[in-house]
Image (cartoon, coloured by chain):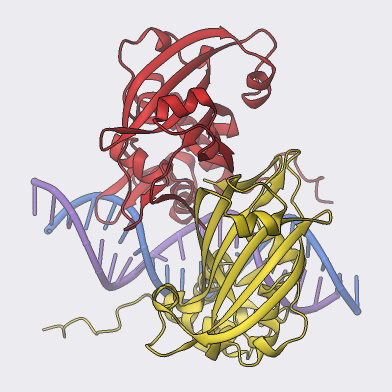
Chain colours: A red, B yellow, C blue, D purple
Amino acid sequence: MSPPAPPDARPLYAKVREQLVERIRSGVWKPGQLIPSEFEIAAEFGVSQGTARKAIGALAAERLVMRQQGRGTFVVEHTPAHVLFRFFNMFDAAGELIIPDSRRARATVAPANDAEQMALQLAPGAEVIRIERVRTRQGSPFIRETIKLPQDLFPDLAQLEDLPNTLYDLFQKTYGILLVRTEDRLSATAADADTAGVLNLTPGAPLLRIERTAFGLGDRPIEWRVSLCHLQDAHYLART
Amino acid sequence: MSPPAPPDARPLYAKVREQLVERIRSGVWKPGQLIPSEFEIAAEFGVSQGTARKAIGALAAERLVMRQQGRGTFVVEHTPAHVLFRFFNMFDAAGELIIPDSRRARATVAPANDAEQMALQLAPGAEVIRIERVRTRQGSPFIRETIKLPQDLFPDLAQLEDLPNTLYDLFQKTYGILLVRTEDRLSATAADADTAGVLNLTPGAPLLRIERTAFGLGDRPIEWRVSLCHLQDAHYLART
DNA sequence: CAGTGGTCTAGACCACGTG
DNA sequence: ACGTGGTCTAGACCACTGC
């Protein structure tokens, strides 16, 4: 007698979660902003407080929001300090987070080549922004990296005079693009003559190569980055 | 008038969780075994089904158990395939998991040196098992590694004739030690003459160096491992 | 003190896997 | 058909924050 299962068989809390994600994505709720309480969200969507709680809990697990007992729930804000802590996984021998500086950033725009089109899942003919920069640690260069971004998501970024040291907070604050996940592929490589010159090394010196793809909401690839790192007494930390 | 907060102010579900962890640690519940249902656990501890559910959910989040709708909840079983999938993070250019072989394993027992004592948090004078081995990929050597274990946790392991390719399932099945977390510190280094000979390389070739600490229940360090990897067209994958 | 997230309960029904 | 985990509700109280 019962009708066939309706096509939208997902749990209620998942649908509520999706609506909340959309509010963050679209900027209705801005970085750092207090969102409504569990009871208000429950009332608005016509669900119980427990279901609203589970939806918000899912957002917290994805680190799209931060909950604070007694205060409320806030949209995550990618400040430079937060971005370094969460996405920059380099530590020195004492286990302290390395704070890099950025130098000589240069941005250009060009049609994507095959590798870029593949990595960023772009349509044929789409343009990319290419950024080359050197990062320094206590004044001396230790990372050379190239960053590729889909041009359409970051209008006029290539025209900026000075790119900030941490890009991900710029992505969120200026372009409304929130990164949620990264995949880093690590290997070792020998410094070529050019890189050796930039990093002040002898050619052939071993470098840690990190190829990163960073994903935004909906698992869309946002950034493709290749970093060549000379880590004197330091390391990349991968947990779990 | 109300008495000061009792010293055991932890949530109920956390106390239940702890008791469940103890059953796994002590071997009352064995690898792969079906544990009681939520209702049975709730009844046994005198809590509601929701609280038992939250305790079991915490175990599932730590990957100590696996839940299967309609079947039940099972203690995680570290089979070789599971161990590779969860703890071996090497992938080839096509994104396929690399399946390594193991060769020439050699185990010895000795008093811990300072580095080993520090890394494994051992008491002064404690002994360690040292394992040296070479791992091969399609027949050719590509990883040389040394593994250190606290001797008291693994009685007679050093006397085993043949060590298996994957050690972590041996840890769980034979010694009742379940690994829950790893920390990998990655850097690049140049092959010394000895390592170059073992891995069939020219001295100075760049190698990926992975220093791993693996932790068991209660966050006790169980294993300290240094791997030197020659990853031809392959990489170590770190997510998030 | 009011308001928030965090815990806990009791009960209902659903979706899934097995016998 | 049965038992499991998964979802959902309604209501209560606790712990923390800020006024």
Residue at 66% in and 7% down:
A125
Instruction: Residue at 57%, 54% (x, y): give it.
Output: B192
Which quadrant holds residue A93?
bottom left
In the picture shown, does residue B162 fall above or below A20? below
Location of residue B63 with respect to A89 vertically, above or below: below
Closer to the camera, B35 or A38? B35
Q: Position of residue A82 (x, y in %)?
A: 32, 41
| For residue A165, side relative to residue B184 (left or right) | left
Q: Is residue B43 among what the camera can see? A: no
Quadrant in the picture for residue B121: bottom left
- Judge whether residue A93 can be spotted in this image: yes
Q: Nearer the viewer, residue B13 or B169?
A: B169
Q: Nearer the viewer, residue B118 or A120?
A: B118
Residue B206 located left or right of residue A172: right
Question: Residue at the spot x=71%, y=43% of the render?
Answer: B232
B14 relative to B174 in the view: left or right: left
For the image shown, how many numbered marks are present on the structure?
Answer: 0
Q: Nearer the viewer, residue B46 or B90?
A: B90
Q: Position of residue A127 (x, y in %)?
A: 58, 9
Q: Position of residue A53 (x, y in %)?
A: 44, 53
Task: Note whether B37 is above or below B103 in the view shown.
Answer: below
Residue A48 x, y percent position in the rendering: 47, 52
